Each structure stands twice: as structure tokens, then as C-alpha cells.
Image (cartoon, helix red, strand yellow):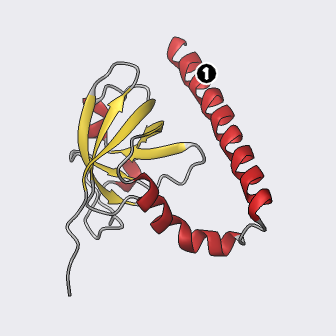
Amino acid sequence: MQNTKLVLIMMIGLAIIEFSIVQSSNAAATATGPTPSVASARKIAPSTAVKAKANKSMKGLAAVYSDKFNGRKTASGQKFCQSQLTAAHRVLPLGTNVRVTNLRNNKSVEVRINDRGPFHGSRVIDLSTAAAAEVGMKKTGIALVQLEVISKPATKNS
């Protein structure tokens, strides 16, 4: 019951933060001109977001991957395995190593981004079961975390 209340409080807090960010970005957009269409924003968002956030830490909700994805192909082409220390992130380059720290207990784990997602409103990362166990969130399934980019994948020169 206490965990449920904590998760609910965290989700409400993040919703308030997300709302205030949207409000401030809408105010800035109104001051600078019209906003691009959703389709064009989707095309440019990943590369812009990676450049802006790649060296900074990010905070948000993390969740555990569903078991139904075990054995399925990830965005990187690898098969997803719940026993590996991997994660899904919307914009960080595939192959990026990220330190994920549970802000409730300060436990952390280093994961490799090998998939895209989460595609649920307020979550910033989905963790494999093994990674979730390392940070102490396997039982609750969701936690407030901080992400720090440790290393980016090497770029291929052609």
C-alpha cells in the first residue's frame, strides 16, 4: 500500500513538472513564432534531443520491460533478454552506456541502450528485469531514477 502511494505521488509530481515544462515551451514558441507540425517535430526531435541531452543527466520514471518482449528483436537487431543489463530509451543512440540510479535507495546499474521506447507518457527508460533488480525496483516495477550517459557508441566513418 505504501509503495502504491509513493508511486502515485511520484507520478503526480512528474505530471506537474511535465505540465510546467510544456507550458514554458509553449510560451517560448509563441514568442518566437509558429510551432512546427507534429509530423515534422517527430522527424527532428530525436537528433535534436540527443545533442541537447547526451552529456547531461536526466530524471524521470523507469519501468521494467514486460516479459512478453523476451526473445523478440530489439531496435538494435539483437534479441531482447531479460537477464542482460539492457534498456530502451527514446532518443539516446543505440549502444550508449547509461548509469541508472534509483533515487529512492541510491542503487545504480550501468545498462546499454539496445531498444527504443518507452512509449508511455511520463517514463524515460524501460529496464530489463536484471537491471531493475540491480537498482531495487523489480518488485514495484516503477521508480524515479536519474540517468547519466557514461559513453556513446563509436561512430562509423565511411
Q: Is residue 152 something that shows in the picture?
A: yes
User: What type is the residue that disc 1 sits on?
Assistant: Ile
Q: Position of residue 3 (x, y in %)?
A: 50, 17
Residue at 24% x, 36% y: name it: 109
On-image quarter of the N terminus: top right
Residue at 66% x, 43% y: name it: 21
Residue at 37% x, 40% y: name it: 147
Q: Where is residue 86 in the image (x, y as percent from the top left)?
A: 27, 49
Q: Is residue 69 left or right of residue 156?
A: right
Residue position marked by numbered label 1 in the rendering:
9
Identify the residue at the far front of this view: 32
Q: How many marks?
A: 1
Q: Can you tell which quarter of the image residue 36 is in?
A: bottom right
Q: Position of residue 128 (x, y in %)?
A: 31, 44
Q: In this view, does 49 lie to the left or right of 65?
A: right
Secondary structure found at label 1 = helix
Q: Where is residue 106 in the image (x, y as percent from the top left)?
A: 31, 22
Residue at 57% x, 25% y: name it: 10
On-image quarter of the C terminus: bottom left
Identify the residue at the far top of this view: 2
Mark 1 is surrounded, within 10 Å at the Cα level, by few (under 14), some (14 to 19) or many (20 or more) other residues, namely few
Identify the residue at the far bottom of this view: 158
Q: Is residue 28 above or below residue 45?
A: above
Q: In this view, does 150 lie above or below 102?
A: below
Q: Is residue 142 something that shows in the picture?
A: no
Q: Nearer the viewer, residue 22 or 52?
A: 52
